Structure formats: C-alpha cells, structure tokens
Amino acid sequence: MTFLSTPLLKQLEQATFWLYCVAAAAYPFSVAATNIALGSALGMGLINGQFAEGCRCLWKHHRALSIAWLVYLALLPIGLIWSPDRSWGLHIVARQWYWFIIPLSCVVLTIPKNRNTFLFILGVSLSLHLMFCVGQMLEIIHFTKDGSTAMDPTGHIGHIGFGFVYGVWAGWLLHRGLLWQGWKRWGAWTLATWAATMVFLAAGRSGYLVVSVLLLLVLWKLLCIQPWIKTTVTILAFVTVLAALTLGPGKQRMAWTWHSIQSMQQGDFKHAEARWSLWYAAIKAWQTHPFTGVGTGGYRIAAAKIKQLHPDLWYGGLLPAHPHNMYLLALSRWGPIGPLALITLLALWMRMGWRMDWQRTDTASLIALPGVAIAVHGLSAPSLEEHFSGILAALLLGAGLAAMRKNPTTSSPYGGQPNAPTSDA
C-alpha cells in the first residue's frame, strides 16, 4: 500500500503475525477470542497488502485449487437466490469468513521462524487443553458443554470437533517425529499417542474414524519398506483399531451403531439414531428440486415439511440445521453440482499433499491431513462449516502453502534451499 510508510508496514506485518499467535493460544479454549484475533489479523492484512499478496500467490501457483475454492464458496451466496430461508442462509454464508485467512497465511507464515513459532504455540495450547480434558475425565474439573462431560471428556472443543482436531494433530506429530531425532522424536510421538488415546476415550465415532485414517495414511507414506510389508503393517494396524473399537471404550458406541443399522434394515426410523432420519430428509429434500436443490439455508424448512409427510422420522430434538453429512448437505442445497464442486475441491486439496515428498518435510502433512480429515469427518458432520474443524484446516493448509513459497531472504527450516513455488494447475 503506497500510502503507508515502510516502517509502518513492517510493524503492521509483525502485528498480524502476533495476532496469529494469539489465535493459536486461544484456539482450543475460546471461540470468541480466536475469532477476534483472526478477524483482526484479516483486517490488518487487507490494510497492509498481505492478503492481496497471498491471493496473487495462490492464483499464480495453485490456480486449480483456487478455482475450486472460488466455485464452492460462490455456491453459498448464489444458493440464497432460491432458498426458502434466506435469513438462515445469510447466517451460514457469514460463518465462512475464516476461509479467507488461507491467502493471508501464505504470506504471514512464509518465514520459517514465524511458522514454527505459530505451530509451537498451537501445540502447547492443544497440550494444555488435553490436560484440561484429563482433569475433566477424573472429575477434578467440573465442566459440561456441547456434549463434553466426564464420560466424554472433550473440553471446550466439544463432542463433535474433538476427534477431528486431535486426529489431525496426532497425525502431524507422528510425521514430524519421524523427521526429528532423539528426544524431539519421542516427545512428538508421546504427544501423538496421548492425543489419539484421548480421542478413543471420548464417545465420538467420527473421531475414531478420523484418527484411524490419518495415522494409517502417515504410516503408509513414511514406511520405506517393501509394498507387501507395508500392506501387512497397514492391515495389522487396521485390525488393532477394530479391536480397540469392539473391546475398548468405543464398544458401546459401535454396538449402538450396529443396532441402528439393523433398525434401518427393517425401516424402523424411531429405533435408529437420528442421523438416518436426517440423511433420509436430505435425499428427499434434493428430490423435490433435483436440479437446483433447496438452496443455502433451505434444509431446515425442507426437513420440517418432509417430517410432516413421514411422521416416523426422528430428528433427535429441535428442527435440524443440517443432515450431519457434508456431502448430502451439498446435494440438498445445490443439487448435483454441490457434491461435485465439494469433491473436486477436496480431491485437489488432498492430491496436492499426497504428491509431495513426505520423507523430507512436514509440509505434505500440513496440507494433506486437514483435507483428508475434512473429507472423512464430513461423512457425519458439516466439517467445512464447523468452527474448530474449519479454522484448524484453514490455518494448517495456509501454513503448508506458505512453506511451499520461495523465500530468498531466509533459509529453509529443513536445511538447504527453500522450497520453490509449485503449481497444481
């Protein structure tokens, strides 16, 4: 920005970075503080030109991913045109603001020292939150919020997002530990084990699936052994996860899942869990408008009308805002173009991280793991639109893309020359 002096620009850029650090420290504990810090950083980035620079970088070096993001985000306001509930649709659109921190992160976190400081603060904050969850589980701390209880110790993050957050963190720590040596490696792996164990001590089946898929993904990419041995190790790990689900803390939840499946086979919605009714309503809502869907925010009204036609449906309480499935939500909102745009976005996102060199840097896992977690978690939640899953995915994707930028004034955090920009177009 030409009207700002160079010293002032430098101060604004440094302030933007420290706002990122504040957001990282507050992330597991306070939704409001995280939003204020990141919102302030975004506003400052608009003033000092960092946001515009990040947009140019994304468009130049990651054009296919940028177009996919623009298409998906454009569907949200466009879907308001035919939505029967525009006020709720506007609420949904407004909540997508945090995806705009991705281009800003590409600039703010380009310098390795800044990026590592940010990730360190985020890791410390997540560790402290895990300690809080242990205290909650032991009933030393009495805390109840969003399904978080002593029987389901998920702290301030709550029942839905806990498995996503700590699954991604555990996977990244496993990868990072393999790149380190000595006490750093064992420290990272200890934290990863702790995080994964806490997910399985909680009651979220989506969390079980996210953790299992991400840890298996990291092992598959990093085990430098013969393919048949790698396959055998993967199968053994999968069997271990199944044993933990059927014999460990997840046994009751898996039994309830099996009971729900049996009830649905008999067409009994009332004795199955609410998600089956919500998914059924999403499909029926789409069928009423097979080409356009019911619009952004229209699911609630559509689900209410469908329940009038099918009184045996059970939504589990108040009128649902979404069907607890990201893909069916996109289908019911925008018709076939919705899940097509969503799957294209996720495929490009995951493909970028999958094709990178996992043996040398953790950049690949910063990009791939949040994308895979969004895709898996989306089977039972609107993961792109949830605070904890969405913000963490945006921050880590931005950090990964920042690590791919060429920065001739600084040295690479991994030794040698910095990573040159690459294109996914």
Image (cartoon, helix red, strand yellow):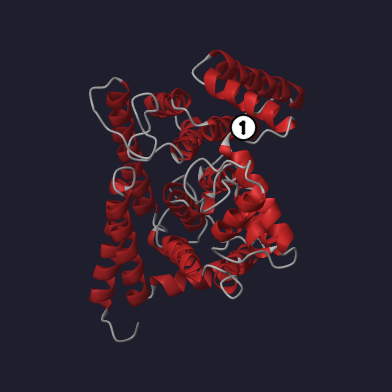
Q: Please state which of residues 382 and 215 is positioned toward the viewer in this rendering.
A: 382
Measuring 51% from the left and 70% from the top, which residue is drawn there? 86
Where is residue 394 drawn, in percent x and y?
47, 55
Measuring 58% from the left and 32% from the top, which residue is drawn there? 209
Q: Residue furthest top?
A: 247
Q: Is residue 407 visible?
A: no
Give above or below for 415 relative to 270: below
Query: So how many labels did they put on this image?
Result: 1
Give above or below for 233 relative to 264: above
Which quadrant does the N terminus fall into?
bottom left
Where is residue 262 drawn, in percent x and y?
70, 26
In the figure, is residue 225 to the left or right of 193?
Answer: right
Q: Amino acid at mark 1?
A: Ala
Q: Which residue is mark 1?
A: 272
Residue 65 in which image quadrant: bottom right
Give above or below for 411 relative to 210: below
Residue 135 in which image quadrant: top left
In the figure, is residue 421 to the left or right of 407?
Answer: right
Where is residue 390 drawn, in percent x and y?
47, 52
Q: Please state which of residues 210 and 400 is positioned toward the viewer in this rendering.
A: 210
Where is residue 257 drawn, in percent x and y?
61, 27
Measuring 75% from the left and 63% from the top, which residue is drawn there? 290
In the figure, is residue 303 to the left or right of 90?
Answer: right
Query: Circle 1: is it few (<14), some (14-19), or many (20+) Cα within 10 Å?
Result: many
Q: Secondary structure at mark 1?
A: loop
Measuring 67% from the left and 64% from the top, which residue is drawn there? 293
In the figure, is residue 245 to the left or right of 355?
Answer: left
Q: Is residue 27 visible?
A: yes
Which quadrant does the C terminus fall into?
bottom right
